[in-house]
Image (cartoon, rainbow, N blue to C red):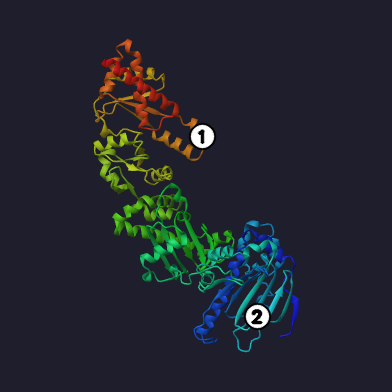
Amino acid sequence: MNPEQGSISIHTENIFPIIKKWLYSDKDIFVRELISNGVDAVNKLKRLVALGEAQVEDNPKYFVRVVYDKDKKTLAFIDNGIGMTGEEVKKYINQIAFSGAEDFIAKYQDKADEANQIIGHFGLGFYSAFMVADRVQIDTLSYQKDAEAVRWVCAGGTEYEMMPSDRKERGTTVTLFLAEDAQEFLEEYRLRETIEKYCAFLPVEIFLNNINPPKEEHAKEREAKPLNDTNPLWMRDPKECTSQDYKEFYYKVFTDFREPLFWIHLNVDYPFNLKGIIYFPKINNEFDRLEGKIKLYNNQVFVADNIKEVIPEFLMLLKGVIDCTDLPLNVSRSFLQKDSNVIKVSKHITKKVGDKLTELFQGEREKYHQYWDDINPFVKYGCIREEKFYDRVKDIIVYRTTKGDYLTLQEYLSRNKAKHENKVFYVTDERQQAQYINLFKEQDLEAVILSGPIDIHFIQFMEGKEKDVRFNRIDSDLSDSIKETKEQDEKTKERLTEIFQGALANDKLKVQVETLKAEDIPAMVLLSEHSRRMQDLSVLFGRSDLKGMFPDEEILVLNAGNPLVQAVLKLSDRPERKESLDLICRHLYDLAMLSHKQLEPAAMTEFIARGNKILMMLAQEEK
């Protein structure tokens, strides 16, 4: 062909500066775009060969090769795909694939948040090269018989040059002459990191080569290995995948070497194309519950992590990969929110997760119980966030009890209804509330354990769904089953109230006198469920200023059948023992509080000093 010069068919010269400005924060995306173009070129050729419309050498080894040259400051993307003729270069490169550049500029010039959604949506994939290059050169040779190799060069304006190329092999080489602020892409670690981020599962082998490789050991061996897995697990038939395959894929993709609990392999061809694997990870501590990551792919090309418009929000607590070719590679999130395929995909994923949990509950309930401590934050969050998910799983939500069993709400109510009516007693801290738990166990009662951060919200959510059911913390109310039914003497109640209010210098203290079935417990502290929830919520949302609006409604419950309480009544008749009486009353109160919550540092110091003083008094009485 004869050398040719011309102008790229756009209506403004501002297009390249705009591309650079908008995509600067994610400029590594050009690697994805140029490698994806190479993969597309290979796939097009494969299709033509399969249709008998193109001929190639026997068993060709298709590739995309990224070659960097630090001396010349160039980065080349080479493929042996379909290639282009001169006419195709003019058609696909010189005419930017969108209409009306001025409209494009006017619409998006002030929208920085659209930065990494522009390229794919407007067919600008190749032009992402100008984010990092001062000059771009294309050398290409079409697969067609007797085609001539073509070179295209552009220095970042609208002017280009076309001329014959010395390329001998079918395919395309895109060479970037990197700008000064893009030299980082001449470092192996940076290129390797970017390729593995975006292209780890593309279906054509990708190689990274240094034009002047170091003489270090294993350098050549490293360059001979592809950086990607061309047949990722989610693209395979689930029937062909073993448990070990799923585990190894999980370890590799998420660098999490704890074995996942279980997984769901998504494989849908109609009414939309969706493949993927969702893992339920094992949780070691509370912080792990925030570490979920769902990777979104389009035809094996990485798009982004945790796109909540595509993936139901509650699934963000899990880990997995979703590949949906019906979703555009780069679009604005406002577009995704309205896209019918996005809505269908989200609903389908929700359904499959609910079905998997139900299948486990019904078919392998013991195993389901083993998983529950890890998966319950996800299930509860999903119920709160998505009504349809709650409808799917409401009958398989289980609660671990103080007896070590796992019961559904209906199972718990059925087993305890005669004793608790429609109350669900719960525990938030098994150590702190051990006294109350033991009291329940002695009477063959049980409470459920709700100790996670989400449980404050989940309790209120469930009360909204189950109108007749009320959740009460184990130290907020006394079940009738743990106290005697006999009436207390009014004079005794009044006398004990007066004694403890005086000893604690608190005439507002509420005192309740009962005869508990467990005689060894002298006193307990109760806090109303309403008051506790208000305080918990104020702490959860960091609103310490609200705490004063919800004062403690503590009730000191004294066990009239306990010898210590009876001794307090006797001591109150001896004025000379007033000091001892006050010490014992304050100590009984603090002992009750310790089973209710931690004492403040000053109160704990006083408690220890008082305990020592009481022991000294007892020792002196023995002399």
Q: Position of residue 183 (x, y in %)?
A: 66, 63
Q: Is residue 586 above or below residue 346?
A: above
SS at badge 1: helix
* Residue hosting label 1: 544
Front-most of residues 593 and 551: 593
570 sits left or right of 348 in the view: left
Q: Which amino acid type corresponds to the residue marked 1 in the rendered image? A: Ser
Report the quarter where the N terminus lies: bottom right
Number of on-image labels: 2
Question: Disc 1 to disc 2, how far (Cα)?
Answer: 68 Å
Q: Quadrant of residue 363?
A: bottom left
Identify the residue shown where x is 69% and y is 57%. Answer: 110
Residue 162 image point, x, y percent:
72, 79
- Counting residues from the start of the chain, the first of labels 1 and 2 encountered is 2
* Residues packed near mark 2 inside 10 Å, few (<14), some (14 to 19) or many (20 plus): few
- Compared across the picture, whether 174 is left or right of 309 comes to right
Near mark 1 (Cα within 10 A), the count class, few <14, some 14-19 or many ≥20, is: few
Residue 494: give x, y in percent of width and height.
32, 18
Give above or below for 270 relative to 474.
below
- Whole-percent x and y of residue 342? 51, 63
Inspect this view and state whether residue 57 appears: yes
For this orientation, the residue located farthest to the bottom is 146
SS for callout 2: helix
Asked if residue 378 lies left or right of residue 158, the reply is left
Mark 2 sits on what residue? 88
The quadrant of the picture occupied by the C terminus is top left
Of residues 552 and 385, the one nearer the viewer is 552
Given the image, on which type of amino acid does mark 2 rest?
Glu
